[in-house]
Image (cartoon, grey):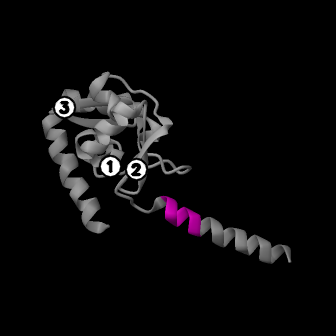
């Protein structure tokens, strides 16, 4: 009997791992399906700072829940989500420029040409600034298209 339970648990772990490793167009938290780890993506533009969102003000967009500080921020996003959603589905911009998928730290970001780019570590953001943001965007855009085509 214990062998059956162990076997079922192993199978469930493999199924869960496969889902966790599957590419999704929006990088979302494992629990709750939150985009940008629950941070308000409009705040990067309106406050020039990361701000945690509030579960009372949320929008469903591209299969993820996006949280906002207040109704005004929620409505701003809802009117034009593509203007406020981070590039590359919220995956690390630096790693995307290298052809990899990686999570982000909502506190490490930059805005370039009115677009939000998130990073997993400050070293990635610094790399972009030192080696040319526009060039890194070209690299990341190419790799992002490859990920989207494989989906």
- The residue depicted at 73 percent of the width and 74 percent of the height is 7
Image marks 1 and 2: residues in contact by CB distance under 8 Å: yes
> Is residue 75 shown above or below 46?
below
Callout 3: SS:
strand
Q: Which mark is residue 27?
A: 2
The one nearer the camera, 29 or 52, is 52
The quadrant where residue 13 appears: bottom right
On the picture, is 149 further left or further right than 38?
A: left
Q: Within 10 Å of the Cα at label 1, are there few (<14), some (14-19), or many (20+) other Cα atoms?
A: some
Mark 2 neighbour class, 10 Å CA radius: few under 14, some 14 to 19, many 20 or more: many
Determine which residue is flagged by label 3: 112
Q: Is residue 100 left or right of residue 149?
A: right
Say which label, 3 or 1, has the lower sequence index. 1
Residue 122, given in percent of the width and then of the height, sits at 36, 28
Q: Earlier in the sequence, mark 2 or mark 3?
A: 2
Q: Position of residue 20 (x, y in %)?
A: 51, 59
- The rendered magenta stretch, by its main secondary structure, is classed as helix
- Residue 39 in magenta? no
Using the image, tell me which numbered label, if any, was put on residue 89. 1
Instruction: Check residue 34 in the rendering and tell me which mark sits there, or answer none.
Output: none
Residue 2 position, x and y percent, is: 84, 73
Circle 1: element type? helix
* Residue segment shown in magenta: 15-20
CB within 8 Å, label 3 to label 1: no
Whether residue 133 is situated above or below residue 151 in the rendered picture: above
Residue 18 lies within the magenta run: yes
């Amino acid at each position: 009997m214990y062998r059956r339970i162990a076997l079922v648990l192993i199978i469930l772990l493999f199924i869960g791992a496969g889902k966790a490793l599957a590419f999704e167009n929006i990088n979302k938290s494992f629990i709750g399906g939150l985009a940008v780890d629950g941070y308000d993506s409009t705040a990067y533009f309106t406050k020039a700072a990361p701000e945690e969102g509030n579960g009372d003000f949320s929008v469903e967009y591209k299969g993820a829940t996006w949280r906002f500080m207040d109704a005004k921020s929620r409505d701003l996003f809802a009117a034009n989500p593509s203007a406020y959603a981070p590039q590359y589905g919220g995956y690390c911009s630096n790693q995307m420029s290298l052809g990899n998928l990686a999570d982000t730290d909502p506190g490490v970001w930059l805005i370039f040409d009115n677009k939000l780019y998130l990073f997993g570590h400050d070293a990635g953001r610094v790399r972009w600034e030192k080696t040319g943001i526009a060039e890194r965007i070209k690299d990341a855009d190419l790799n992002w298209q490859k990920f989207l085509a494989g989906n």
